[in-house]
Image: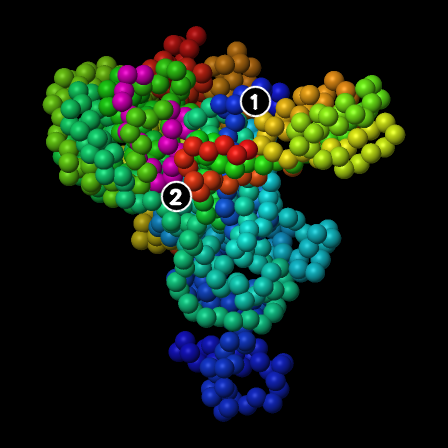
Amino acid sequence: MSTTTITKDSRHTLSVLVKHNLNTFSRIIGIFSGKGFELESVTFASEAERGMARITITTYGNEETVEQINKHLHNVIDVLKVTDLTHKKCIERELAIVKVSTAKVGRPEIMLIAQAFKAKVIDITADKLALEVTGNTDKVDAMIEVLKPYGITEMSRTGSVALKREFQGAVNIN
Amino acid sequence: MKSTESTSTALKSDQTAKPGVTESTAPETMPVQAALTHNGADILIKTLADLGVDTIFGYPGGAVLPVYDTLFDNHDLNHVLIRHEQAGTHAADGYARATGKPGVVLATSGPGGTNTVTGIATAMMDSIPLVVFTGQVPTGVIGNDAFQEADIVGITRPITKQNYLVRDVNELEHVIREAFHIATNGRPGPVLVDLPKDMLNTKGRFSGMKKVDIPSFKPTVNGHHPQIAKAAEMLSNAKKPLIYVGGGAILGEAWEEVTAFAERMNIPVTTTLMGLGAFPESKPQSLGMLGMHGTWYANMAMTECDVLIAVGARFDDRVTGRLDGFSQNSRKIHIDIDPSCIGKNVPVEVPIVGDVKRVIPAIDKLATPPEISEWWDTIHTWQKEHPLVVPEADDKIYPQHMVKMISEVTEGNAIVVTDVGQHQMWAAQHYNYNHPRSWISSGGLGTMGYGFPAAMGAALACPDRDVVCITGDGGFQMSSYELATAVEYKIPVKIALMNNNCLGMVRQWQQLFYNNRTSYSVFGSNNPDFVKMAECYGAVGMRATNPAEMREVLTEAMKIKDGPVLMDFRVVETENCYPMVPSGAALNEMVESDEECK
Ligand SMILES: Cc1ncc(C[n+]2csc(CCOP(=O)(O)OP(=O)(O)O)c2C)c(N)n1
Ligand SMILES: [Mg+2]
């Protein structure tokens, strides 16, 4: 993907409610590939309501670009609703599994870091630990940054899922 | 009559399943039986007829044989056997542009479907309502690279407004109704429906339920009132206002509203290539077309205006020229039914999402005519100093004169259909457009080969109108085989071939921007004898090499009503199309002659 630096102001999380079918999913992805918009992550999952799915997209661009993305998403016939969660108070989570080398510093130091991020150890081998971390994208980014110097050998991230908070007042229970 | 017909169809298709059914018991069992006596192919044709479709353009093949079997003895609609699916799609598109009704295409799987792609993309770019039906391999083998399998839903996804693969025969009728609804509502566009062969052979239900309700598809038609009020206020106080009308005013059938508004406000009007005919060019407010080959004064007015109202136009790059030089000092109002068109290329102060047919009268109600006599003086001076020029008449046919003579002979009342190239731009400049849906041209995609089949579609749709296809020697050869169709169905298209023995527009660009290196753009004597070509299909062919012959040929051609006529007009080969905004230049940096380019 592009090497453009992702700044906090330019990242947007869009939550898109669609009729559940793969043609619609492809149409939505096609907007990004066909019209040259950035796409950082995307998740697709069935909704509780029958026949629906929710697509959570993380993209970045200036306000005008994101507005265009929004309009194009709306134009997809099977899209029922697009919510830009960026300026709303939202609950956002992402999960990552990170394999990190213990060769340099040994297990305890890595496990201390894991603890600080409330990450779980889910696999142990002679020279590696696999950690599972959940949180908003910033938190996942932060843990990865801290682990990098020790040698990340493999990693898998889900991308964000997000919903608007019911209570839009001041709150912070991340 | 209709009910007996359907009873007999029902009986016929029932015979294999229930040999014991006799004619006398059939009517009683009908209500119960009716539900399952139709296969997918029957349901397709029944639904089309129920939707008021009168004409479809099609070509048979393995996957759609069930549909052709239904068509064999069904006379509810007119099937036109075109000679190539691309031409069929263009014909349906021409039919749609001439009437506003959706054009309908039927093609087989694989190559049949892929042949429609250029036609679908052409319709998509110009927002033309089409419904394209393609056959597909049986559901059980989809994905297996079966014979004549192509993932046409995947291929056409970016060039359709919506598309479907129908696996369940009981969803077919509903999907078809939805497809027509989507194609024609909001910003129109093409929709494709892919029909697996086994589904077409399966018995299913036809309900006749007409209602379509798609909760996720509710285009905004009434503009936002405060924005409308702001637009009215800006126009009322403008010193140098301009109305810029695009194809949306045609698609939205808003020509009367736009004309009434512009006349009452006495504001100058320029139209895009797609908007020609939305405002009569005979009116004093008309500045003609703007853009790359627009009039000098329209482009200057666009550059200098202080309030611009865009009506169903999309600030296309052929209209704006270099963006940083585009209408820098104007406050902009933009009305469009498609929100994604607004603010895409040019920032707009007052966006109004809505149907132009409703929004324009709403603005009209609130606005008062601005005091702009100075603005008109400036415009009149531009018009005097930089009119659209045509070469002086002599014994040769100049392309511009050819279009002017067609305009004169048809009294500006024909439907003009063009191909793509120099002839297209001259046709846009020099024919006198006073009626909507009378200018049909591939604007967005610029598809060569479009003109002649689109003209056939228009002529079939409007048998009372004269249809003139102004085409090029290059583009005509991309669909000349359709002469066979035009002859078979006696379609009276007047083909006015502007024969300059070259790919004129390409040559013009090579002359101007590639140091006159005319690489692969000149046919010279390698063109066929077009008159003989017409004749070998059984059509009338005529040739003219000077203005007097041209008038004779045209007059003669207009009398032919029972089939196509091809007029090979040998025009001056070296003529170029001006004014021109060179690509990369700003709209007011026009060149007006070959000399100026040197
Ligand atoms: C399918 C397709 N291929 C290529 C082009 C590029 N093109 C644009 S205009 C033109 C020349 C057209 O020549 P002709 O039909 O003779 O018209 P003229 O310009 O001479 O009037 C070409 C090749 C195109 N628009 N469409
Ligand atoms: Mg030519």
- The residue at label 2 has a CB less than 8 Å from ligand 1: no
Q: Is residue B88 left or right of residue B582?
A: right
Range of residues picked out in magenta: B328-346
- The one nearer the camera, B206 or B71, is B206
Q: Is residue B217 left or right of residue B142?
A: left
The spot of residue B337 in percent (x, y) is 35, 40
Q: Magenta span has B309?
A: no
Of tags 1 and 2, which is closer to the observer? 1
Which residue is at 28% across, 16% downward? B329
Which quadrant holds the C terminus of chain A? Answer: top right
Q: The numbered mark 1 sits on a residue in which chain?
A: A
Residue A22 vertical position relative to residue B385 in the rendered view, above or below: below
- The one nearer the camera, B379 or B129, is B129
Mark 1, secondary structure of its residue: loop
- The one nearer the camera, B149 or B523, is B149
Which quadrant holds the N terminus of chain A? Answer: top right
Which numbered dot is residue B494? none
- The one nearer the camera, B170 or B279, is B170
Q: The numbered mark 2 sits on a residue in which chain?
A: B
Disc 1 from disc 2: Cα separation: 35 Å
Residue B50 lies in quadrant: bottom left
Q: Residue furthest top?
A: B598
Residue B311 vertical position relative to residue B108 in the rendered view, above or below: above
Q: Which residue is mark 2?
A: B187
Mark 2, secondary structure of its residue: loop
Which residue is at 51% across, 41% downward? A163
The spot of residue B145 in percent (x, y) is 73, 51
Residue B340 lies in quadrant: top left
Q: Amino acid at mark 1?
A: Ile
Q: Which residue is mark 1?
A: A6
The spot of residue B62 in percent (x, y) is 65, 60
Residue B344 appears anywhere in the view: yes
